[in-house]
Image (cartoon, rainbow, N blue to C red):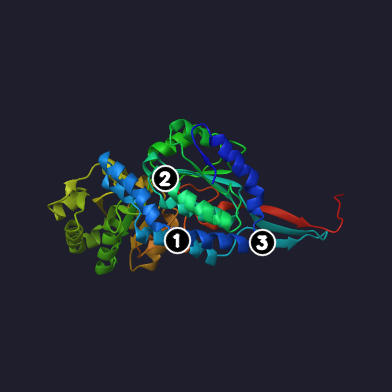
């Protein structure tokens, strides 16, 4: 596999651009064979991958990295199996490349088809998440794109090992050598060079913190999609079933708190607050969650710490939850639209009209009714994997699967028509 070291970012992008047309022309059978081989290779070489990852994890712990970062960084046999399963899930999905979205016949006899086509070269910059290496490689391969991977220094050993395993397996099944490439240089200059590879990179997806997003917004000259913060909310409406509400809130906050689809704020209608909220906060407290609440919450539950505006805007990525009591669904929607990051929001309610209002008026890429925000994930929603969660509105929004890595072109069939 070709890999770039210091100063080699442009060379990697050039190699990727050169094979983009080859990738676009791969048959579905070849793509699926590559994905199957990649999945098998991950499982067969799991011990090797875990060994490489252990060195990254040890270094992160020695450097004092937070528990959330260490959790994201860690590979286990179960997580490798999940990555392998995600690749097989892509095999089971339809190939978007070449899909005819719509077609129509013009009065002059021309047949116009709107057809999906790969973007070309997709680059991803990501931090301390080695599973992204497999997800991106698989999604790009199935959608017919060449991919350029640039992970963080904290996961370098893991990413090198993963990229080698995946690329070797894909090449053995028919993919070109430059289909999956890893940039090993994790310095700022290399990242900036990738952001400015105009004419070579067709889409850049950042998967990292606010600092990375700001750098891309300031410096990128290539097209990009923002995979922003996950300041997610659960709103418990006045008609919510109390047991269901507790189960959803505890899951959304604690099932894996260090990820972007974990809930960071709980919003509760005042009509249910007295009867339900203290018991729910007790359940959260029992799992180690620190509660930061508004005045109403602090009156209802003595252990709550007073919340500030900073709490409403914070993605904690840990066992801290901001809690607010509101007087209406209007107030809940307004609060979420002010402080949310358009990633994932949930309502717990027995009122269908309230649910429809929430899903229509909340500005978010994923809105859940009576379900945890933790389902805001490409694999959980049936995409097999995701290349990111778009928090913007152009091209793609929410978890991005295969179709988000294609554009449409117009293919027009005629039999000699000329314009008069």
Which badge, 1 or 2, comes first in the chain's sequence?
1
Q: Residue at x 42, y 38 (%)?
A: 212
Give 291 or 276, whichever is nearer the viewer. 291
Q: Can the viewer see residue 35 in this picture?
A: yes
Task: State how far apart marks 1 and 3 are (Cα).
Answer: 29 Å
Which badge, 3 or 2, comes first in the chain's sequence?
3
Task: State how far apart marks 1 and 2 are (Cα).
Answer: 26 Å
Q: Residues within 10 Å of mark 2 (few under 14, many from 20)?
A: many
Give the x, y percent position of residue 30: 61, 61
* Mark in the foreground, 1 or 3: 1
Which badge, 1 or 3, comes first in the chain's sequence?
1
Give the x, y percent position of residue 329: 33, 57
Label 3 sits on residue: 100
Label 1 sits on residue: 84
Give the x, y percent position of residue 64: 25, 40
Q: Relative to residue 319, is residue 368 depicted above or below?
A: below
Label 2 sits on residue: 228
Left or right of residue 35, residue 102 in this image: right
Which of the 4 image quarters holds residue 58? Answer: top left
Give the x, y percent position of residue 327: 27, 55
Give 247 or 92, whichever is nearer the viewer. 92
Q: Residue at x 65, y 43 (%)?
A: 18
- Point out the residue furthest to the left here: 302
Left or right of residue 273, residue 202 in this image: right
């Amino acid at each position: 596999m070709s890999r770039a070291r210091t100063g080699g970012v442009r060379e990697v992008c050039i190699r990727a651009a050169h094979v983009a047309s080859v990738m676009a022309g791969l048959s579905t059978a070849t793509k699926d064979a590559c994905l199957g081989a990649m999945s098998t290779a991950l499982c067969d070489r799991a011990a090797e991958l875990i060994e490489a990852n252990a060195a990254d994890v040890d270094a992160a712990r020695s450097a004092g990295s937070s528990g959330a970062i260490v959790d994201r960084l860690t590979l286990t046999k179960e997580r490798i199996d999940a990555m392998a399963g995600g690749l097989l899930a892509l095999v089971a999905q339809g190939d978007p490349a070449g899909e005819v979205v719509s077609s129509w016949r013009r009065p002059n006899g021309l047949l116009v088809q709107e057809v999906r086509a790969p973007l070309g070269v997709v680059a991803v910059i990501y931090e301390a998440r080695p599973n992204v290496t497999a997800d991106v490689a698989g999604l790009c391969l199935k959608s017919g794109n060449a991919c350029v991977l640039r992970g963080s220094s904290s996961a370098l050993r893991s990413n090198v090992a993963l990229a080698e395993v995946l690329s070797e397996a894909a090449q053995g099944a028919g993919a070109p050598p430059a289909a999956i490439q890893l940039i090993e240089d994790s310095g700022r200059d290399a990242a900036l060079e990738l952001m400015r590879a105009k004419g070579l990179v067709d889409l850049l997806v950042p998967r990292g913190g606010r600092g990375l997003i700001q750098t891309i917004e300031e410096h990128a000259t290539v097209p990009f999609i923002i995979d922003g913060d996950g300041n997610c909310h659960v709103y418990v409406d006045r008609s919510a079933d109390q047991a269901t509400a507790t189960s959803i809130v505890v899951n959304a906050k604690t099932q894996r708190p260090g990820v972007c689809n974990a809930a960071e704020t709980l919003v509760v209608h005042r009509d249910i607050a007295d009867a339900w909220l203290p018991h729910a906060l007790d359940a959260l407290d029992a799992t180690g969650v620190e509660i930061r609440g508004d005045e109403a919450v602090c009156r209802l539950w003595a252990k709550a710490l007073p919340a500030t505006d900073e709490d409403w805007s914070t993605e904690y990525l840990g066992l801290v939850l901001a809690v607010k009591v509101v007087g209406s669904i209007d107030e809940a929607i307004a609060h979420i639209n002010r402080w949310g990051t358009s990633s994932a929001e949930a309502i717990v309610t027995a009122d269908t009209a309230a649910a429809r209002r929430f899903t229509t008026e909340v500005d978010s890429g994923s809105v859940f009714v009576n379900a945890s925000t933790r389902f805001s994930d490409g694999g959980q929603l049936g995409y097999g994997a995701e290349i990111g969660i778009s928090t913007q509105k152009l091209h793609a929004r929410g978890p991005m699967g295969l179709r988000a890595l294609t554009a449409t072109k117009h293919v027009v069939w005629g039999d000699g028509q000329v314009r008069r």
